Image (spheres, rainbow, N blue to C red):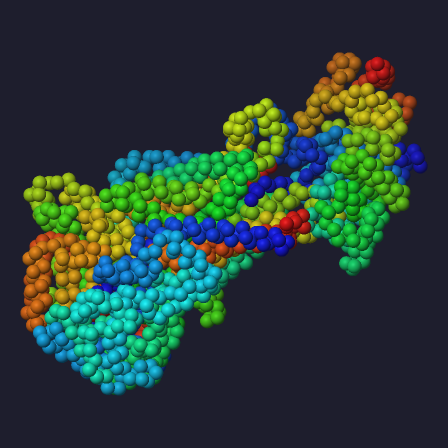
Amino acid sequence: MSLLTSPQPAAAEPAAAPFLDVRDLRVHFPTEDGIVKSVDGVSFTLEKGRTLGIVGESGSGKSVTSLALLGLHKGTRAEVSGEIRLDGRELVSLPERDMRALRGRTVSMIFQDPLSALHPYFTVGAQIAEAYRVHHKVSKKEARERAVEMLKRVGIPQPERRVRDYPHQFSGGMRQRAMIAMALVCDPELLIADEPTTALDVTVQAQILDLIRDLQEEFGSAVVLITHDLGVVADIADDILVMYGGRRIEYGTVHDVLKEPQHPYTWGLLESMPQITGDVERRLNPIAGSPPSLINPPGGCAFHPRCTFKGWVSGGRCAVERPELVAVPGTGRHLAACHLTPETRQEIRVRTAAGAAQ
Amino acid sequence: MTTQQQPMPADTGTTQAGQPSPDPRSDGTVITGRSPARMAWRRIRRDKVTLAAFVITVLFVLIALLAPVLTAITGWGPITPDGKAIDPDTGNFPRGALGGVSLTHLLGVEPGTGFDLFARIVYGLRTSLFVGFASAVLSTAVGVVAGLAAGYSGGWVDSVLSRIMDVMLAFPQLLFIIALTPVIQNAMQTNSHGGTDENLRLLVLVLNIAVFAWAYTARLVRGQVLSLREREFVDAARIMSAGKWHILFRQLLPNLWAPVLISFALAVPQNITTEAALSYLGVGVIPPNPDWGALLSDASQFFLQDPMYLFVPGVLLLMLVLALNLLGDGVRDALDPRAARG
Amino acid sequence: MTRRRRSIALAATAVAIALGATACGGSSSTTGSGSPTKGGTLTVLDHADFDHLDPQRVYTTEGSSMDQELVRTLTGWDETGSRPKLVGDLATDTGTPSKGDTVWTFHLRKGVTWQDGTAVTAQDVKYGVERTFSPDINGGPPYASQWLVGGSTYKGPYSGKELASVQTPDASTIVFQLDQPVPDFNQTTAMPGWSAVPNAHDTGSTYDTHVWSDGPYMIQSYTKNKELVLVKNTHWKQSTDPIRQQNVNEIDVKLGQDQSAIDQQIKSDAGTAQTSIMQWPIAGSDLTTISSDPSLKSRLYKIPAPGINYLAINTTRVKDLKVRQAIEDAIDKTTVRGAFGGSAYGDYASTMLSPGIGGYQKFNLYSTNPAGDLTKAQALMKQAGNPRLTMSLAVENTTTEEHFADAVKTSLGKIGITVNITPIDAANYFSTIDNVKNQYDLTWGDWIADWPNASTVLPVLFDGRQIAKLPQSNQDLSYLDDPAVNAQIDKIAKMTDIKQADAAYGALDEQIMKDAAVVPLMYMNFSELAGSKVGGVISDPILAEPSLVHAYVKS
Amino acid sequence: MLRYLIRRLLAAAAILLVITVITFFIFFALPSDPALLACGKTCSPSRLAEIKHSLGLDQSFLTQFWEFFKGLFVGRDFGDQSVRVHCGAPCLGISFQTDTPVLSTLLGDFPADLSLGLGAAVFFLILGVGLGTLAAVRRGRAADKAAVGLALLGVSVQIYFVGLLLLYLFVDKWQILPASGYTPITQDPSAWFQGLILPWATLVIVYLALYTRLTRSSMLEVFAEDYMRTARAKGLSTGKVVLKHGLRAAITPIITIFGMDVGSLIGGSAVITESVFGINGIGKLAVDSVQNSDLPVILGTTLFAATFVVLANVVVDVVYGLVDPRVRLG
């Protein structure tokens, strides 16, 4: 089984269908200036009880991907293609009506900023109860009791009282807990968490992540965790998908990707992240430059304008030829899209480590 | 009120602050290196409706400017009666169909006086446009200064100015202008010998309209200044001990031109409407001086007998105000990237 | 008197006047043949409220006309014949003059009662007349204070004092002592002011809404600017009243509708419009349409007014007689009349006295062509040295008057006079131009006689001595202060023979016209429309109102 | 809450006081003399002086203002010599023109404004919000373009032009409706309704435009909010998302404007509509009183109208506090 849960190249056909199987997902927005390719051929799989971390900076397409999983692009100008199979059911072509039955019940989502994601004019309890009543024929009272129960489960003190409060009366961490309660109220099989901890301070962050992990164990859900913070991913995820300019650039298990990152962009992400265990003197190097245009992406490797190592590739291939996502030799299930040869990557890593040590 | 318009919930793909949204409208943040004015101009050029409105507005302005030339061609001035075109026995109603439309009187003649309607309309346009623009300029200027002063100074200056704005906005304005006009006109009549100077009268009208319009702009500017003064560049200027006036006019004002221009663009049609309403109620421009509102007021008394006389200026005024409103909307959409007509 | 009250609404409500037939001299016609039916409700539609209904305050034709239903005056006009006839109303006859017309005695009818059944006494009449003198009871005509001995110092009955020159030797006799001979005093007493008010029911300045009735109808309810409801006064007896009848059960006066809306409503003759009549004349803009519609003919009342529409030339500002004469000849009365509503409005005038007024003589000193005599006018201007003149013209700020001003401007432009038009608020127009400090060269005016005699026209409009006496309500709009005219006015006032006086007034009219101080424009007619079921309406040429004293509703 | 309310009401009273002073001062300088108008055609200077005294116009500005101000709280007695008329608090004075207390005149005209303003408000709010919501939901499509276009047309058209056009078509040309005017509902409900159809339609056309635009932009703004996406993510139907979550938030700014509009409409701001359709409301009363230099009525109507605007302001803020849980009044 473990083989099947691990990342597979899009082309490889698994023996049995995984719980979530995304293939060649594309989300394009036509505009006056051209087509914005927010997501451009993304594939991944996920099993129940497992967690996938999708990492990337702003505009990399990770959030658009998550919305596609919920089918929230339906009825808009967005053009979605490819396949999303959830428990064998294809979601891209699913009519809005059927998709609606899945939302909140089978697939649910924890949004990034709970203050803006919760409706300011309704009480927290009412919003949680509403989410429950959409999919369950219960009385208002029962739904309210369910809301109290959920608030209790996510660790909100005095839930009977707080259920009547408005979102603005909650603290940041409590709001996120309420958000989680709302997402979990129907026991979803797939939970998408979009930057669940970004707006929170560090101690609360840890609590929330623990909560998600606990709840996942309890409900056995599959979790897609979207973040730009590799630290969070390291903490909680089983697999990592690194996105850049709407495409996958590195995909593998947490262990592989963090231990042996293959793509210069992933290196950059790691370098821009402080490490508790790391050297205080170590410089944090943010990645220079800005994210690529999604309308006219740079030719070749989308990252090449910002890549400090493109000189290591001969013949200027980086600017001309888009690198394929291929398995890192010796791993078989760790994929990366970069023209650097494995040897060169190794060499660079050694040099950089040496430089940092100085 | 805010007029920002955002896409439907479902097509906002991203949520991170500052992240370039895939929303097609905000492509400006992705494609860098264009000045806001350029971008605005680019948007206007693409907006066919706004362009059409612009062309119509220019056409109206041209007609107003060329009024003497146009009436020289037709041969009838705005206050030259054509006694033959009206029938004294029926109460000076125009002879002939459609309010006396003929080759000499393209739009017919005015009942009662026999003035050429075409000439009165082209000259009346001058008055409407002048009052509309002049009062908008005045109210915007006063509003900007008051708004800047209130927003930037804070403290008692802000309190006093804000209360004045409250009072102005609470006034039953139309009622008050109606009441105020005879007072001022009376003061003027004692100055001139017998007759009333029509330019002075227009000026009073402009002042009256501006007096009740500046508070809107002032409130808008004050709000903008309050948010701007917390921004870094103002702090920076302050730290560099820049003078108050420097900060006001060199730092804040340049950042206000978009909202000010928008409020100006929308004030012009609004003021033209107000002017027409006042003239309709008999306290604006006074016949025989040509003015659209006064024409409509006059026409309203004959509309059962001579509907053409009401419809021609009525429809033209609608066209003018509509064009100016469309233009104002277009300018707003172009200057405020978040606002889109859809 | 009694100019028709001006529209007080803004320009949106047209003022305009009415149409007219040929002013044929006070002929009154009763339309709607057949005998009156009893019962029903008559609706009167008026665009604005009455100035007053308090008989001592009323000075408009509408108010005076409505007061005829409520208030009985000492004398009154019986208008059922071909000419209005002065008769005793509250009094048994038209009064007895003595001491060279300076003392007038009236005897009251027996059996005239108030709405509560108590008798109307001579003391009630005295009290009513005395009220006129109180500053709180303002607005009425000035005759009482002008003529009654001691009137200049008396301040009304509220001060606790009585006016000694009004004597009541017994409950049914009243004697007035005048400080000058007034041969037509008994025509004055037909005005509402010369009526009784019971002290016990006097509510002072609010009497307008509480008028205590001795006429056939009494006030049931009166909401200012909204509605006045009159119901039968059960104590009124037909046998005591030679003028009025009590046919309908109720008179509903609806106030404050737009005149053109009233025109359309009555024209439609639908529903209550069938039993409705308008109080104010048809709007100028509707005049031609309505008066030329043959199907409306039987419902249309063309009432010749004892009055004149004229242009006054300020003789102290336009001093050159030649210029004034040129103006007389230059004015194109056809376009002027067009502005007021066209041929339906009235006939071109050449005299200040209109054909219905005692003393009228037909003459024309200036252009016989109503469109003016430009050649003659230009010749006169040449004689005056062809001055390039600029004149200011004051008119009301109504569409009608502004169009009139445009017509004058055009006419005078042809003889080299530039006219600056000053429109003035309709409500403030007369108080502005009646003030001697006004700066206008030309002013528009109209005047309706208080009673159909030249004595309420020429002395009022041309006695130059009033300019100093009444600096804020001067009626001599041309500021004519011709000693010869003044002397003639005094001379005629002393005449006791009405026929002799009439002839003298006719000559005075011509004398004044030689001064070219005013341009008579039109003899006005007022036109009103009634519903098809309204009968018994009398065209009252005294007030130029549709008199309702015999009105009934056809079943 | 109570403290907030008291503070707001005090501030409102202060604004009204300022408006009273300004109005009083300006009309002190009115061109015409009410005493002269009351005096009649032939008025001697001594008679004029007596009437001036009787009307209290011979007193100084301050005395006159103080008398007026005092009358607001303790009432006044009128009438110099004749029967005294008592005008109970709050006394707005007695009309020079009609000798009736201004307040009773105002209250007498008020039902017309109430009928006109409230009736129209109900229609334009419901229709405007409906049309605006529809336009927002169908953004960019034909329905939206039609709604936006109509709204712009409505914003640009002259109110009296609409009124006269309706009169011309419905009353004169097609004769579908009777000549308009106001009949009290207590007198004849059917006439009340028929007479108000066109005035309502006129106001609705103009205000509907405003509310459609307002609702549309407010809705679109709300549509972009995260919580709207949350609502969809819960699996709610589009209708529920738009009408429950969307409208609930979008209606708040609309309530503000609506409150102000209703306040000024029933306070007599529909002058032009009243004038076109010959409805005797506060607006027409004000216009007439200016023409007649009837100072007490001018003051009364100005104050009456301003009171409604100012009170509407307070009401709107309080309602805002009730509607938006985030706003705490204090």
Q: Residue at x 23, y 84 (%)?
A: C171
Closest to the observer: C440 or A192? C440
With respect to residue C312, does A301 lie above or below? above
Q: Is residue A139 visible?
A: yes
Left or right: D119, with C226 as reference point: right
Left or right: C110, with C318 as reference point: right
Left or right: A18, with A228 as reference point: right
Residue C137: image location, x then y, percent: 29, 67
Closest to the observer: D86 or A149? D86
With respect to residue B93, does B326 lie above or below? above
Using the rendered view, name the quadrant where residue D53 is placed.
bottom left
Closest to the observer: A64 or C128? C128
Q: Residue at x 77, y 16 (%)?
A: A309
Residue A28: image location, x then y, percent: 69, 34
Q: Quadrant of the N terminus of chain C?
A: bottom left
Residue B9: image location, x then y, percent: 67, 43
Left or right: D185, with C314 as reference point: right
Q: Is residue C522 visible?
A: no
Q: Residue at x 6, y 57 (%)?
A: C484
Spot the residue most to the right: A1
Q: Residue at x 34, y 51 (%)?
A: D30
Using the rendered view, name the quadrant where residue C156 is placed.
bottom left
Using the rendered view, name the quadrant where residue D52 is placed.
bottom left
Closest to the observer: C373 or C99? C99
